[in-house]
Image (cartoon, grey):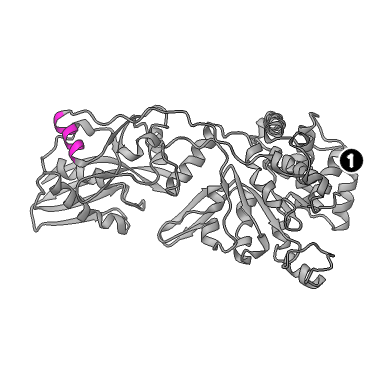
Amino acid sequence: MSYAKVLCVGLVGVTGHLVEVEADLAAGLPAVVISGLPDTALHEARDRVRAAVVNSGQRWPNRRITLNLLPATLPKFGSAFDLAIAAALLGGSGELPLLPLEGVVVLGELGLDGTVRPVRGVLPMVAAAAQAGIARVIVPVGNAAEAAVIPGVRVRAVDNLHRLVAFVRDGTPLIEPPADIPEPLAGGPDLADVAGQQMGRRALEVAAAGGHHVALLGPPGAGKTMLAERLPSILPELDDDAALEVTALHSVAGLLPPGGRLLRRPPFQAPHHTASVPSLVGGGSGLARPGAVSLAHRGVLFLDEAPEFSKGALEALRQPLEHGRIQLSRSGGGTVYPARTQLVLAANPCPCAKPAGDAHCECSPLVRRRYLGRLSGPLLDRIDVQVRLMPVRAAELMATDGDVEPSATVAARVAAARQAAASRWAGLGRRLNAEVEGPHLRRPPWRLPARVTVELRGRLDSGSLSARGFDRVIRMAWTIADLDGRDRPDQDDVREALQLRTGEAT
């Protein structure tokens, strides 16, 4: 009987777990048995590994082979275990001395010809290895740049099984990851392109500074989509921790762009209105994959023509909007994905998409109410900023570029406001006003004087504003004060926040 062990990493959602791939070769009828809660892709690994080993010029052991993936209670998904299985199997058969792989994590999928193919989720896998104290990893050459992002880990790459065998047997050097080349700054949509809509621009600035959700209501051509698409241009770049979170989610989803760099720009997701519930919040067979709300983590989720989305899809967003994460349970297991995103809804006033009151509008008042009624009260109650945009006037449309602020100018104010908020809430472990829990805002030392909140308390007592809405207005008031450079909100800040909340601003 022969035994060998190689380290690998398994993913559950975006959380990595160190996995020991054990190979036991015993006398008996030739067979390959895989244990340790493997999924279908792992069950098929025995055929891929056998073909890869033979086609790489290695001898396949005609013995009873038992492969076990520890811990056995952790579900294992995907094909990233192929290379580790092949190494453990060759080590157990005596073909390879596995001392060079001791304390090394091995990742990669094998093709039938022995090539090592890139896999999804390498970034969170290498991060998990680093947290477990592993200092060396071997990854597919297509994932080398992505894996090299994690500090403190020595990354080497292989393009085929033969190269790994030569390294273990003869010390042949592996492939170095490519040098990190700074990504050129790419131009994008700019706020200077938006004609008029001062109220919409102000709403966008407040939303960006405080991390608030936005609903833009108005006729077609008013600039709802243009404003939403330009929100990322006034958001600060992601810091290291946020960039790792966002990049890991895109790695798991297989959506990382070539080059494997950290994603520094806030992501922007704009699913079509026919999107299903799983595509929005996550889903799929086995273990659920991240949906648009998680892929927009630390960025913007834009739902254009929001009333056209299915009711189930819209209502499924309520929990992640409130808690900043989405918990998914499927037959293959449960997982939690981060989902701290800024939601932007855009909606026309009616199905015919003509301004309300226009002589050519084909919709009755009842039809208009029913159309906007598809956005339920509980969902809208979680939207901080709700503004109604008016049609653009000819003078605003023909204004010169010098009359409007570009994104860079607004982004500077947003960054300063976010810095002020982060300093204020550091003791609570929060960075944005939208993240601060309501009880903290209603207690000393952050409780606002009664004279400042008198109108707000009147709305709450009359029932025209919910308790959740009360807290959200207070949060926006703090954001407005931060943008204006004041250390505490005054009555005007609360009044403006209330107008942005109720859509009563003109």
Residue 44 rendering spot, x and y as whole percentages: 25, 57
Residue 109 rendering spot, x and y as whole percentages: 28, 47
- Does residue 467 appear left or right of residue 141 in this picture? right
Q: Tell me what residue is drawn at x 80 percent, y 68 percent.
A: 360
Residue 338 rendering spot, x and y as whole percentages: 54, 46
Q: Would residue 349 be visible to someone looking at this image?
A: yes
Q: Is residue 226 inside the magenta stretch?
A: no
Residue 456 rendering spot, x and y as whole percentages: 86, 47
Q: Tell me what residue is drawn at x 68 percent, y 36 percent.
A: 407
- Does residue 257 appear left or right of residue 212 in this picture? left
Name the kind of residue labelled 1 in the image: Ala
Question: Tag 1's secondary structure?
Answer: loop
Q: Main secondary structure of the magenta part?
A: helix
Q: Which residues are magenta?
A: 162-170
Q: Would residue 433 be visible to someone looking at this image?
A: no
Q: Which residue is mark 1?
A: 450
Q: Is residue 168 inside the magenta stretch?
A: yes
Q: Tell me what residue is drawn at x 57 percent, y 34 percent.
A: 238
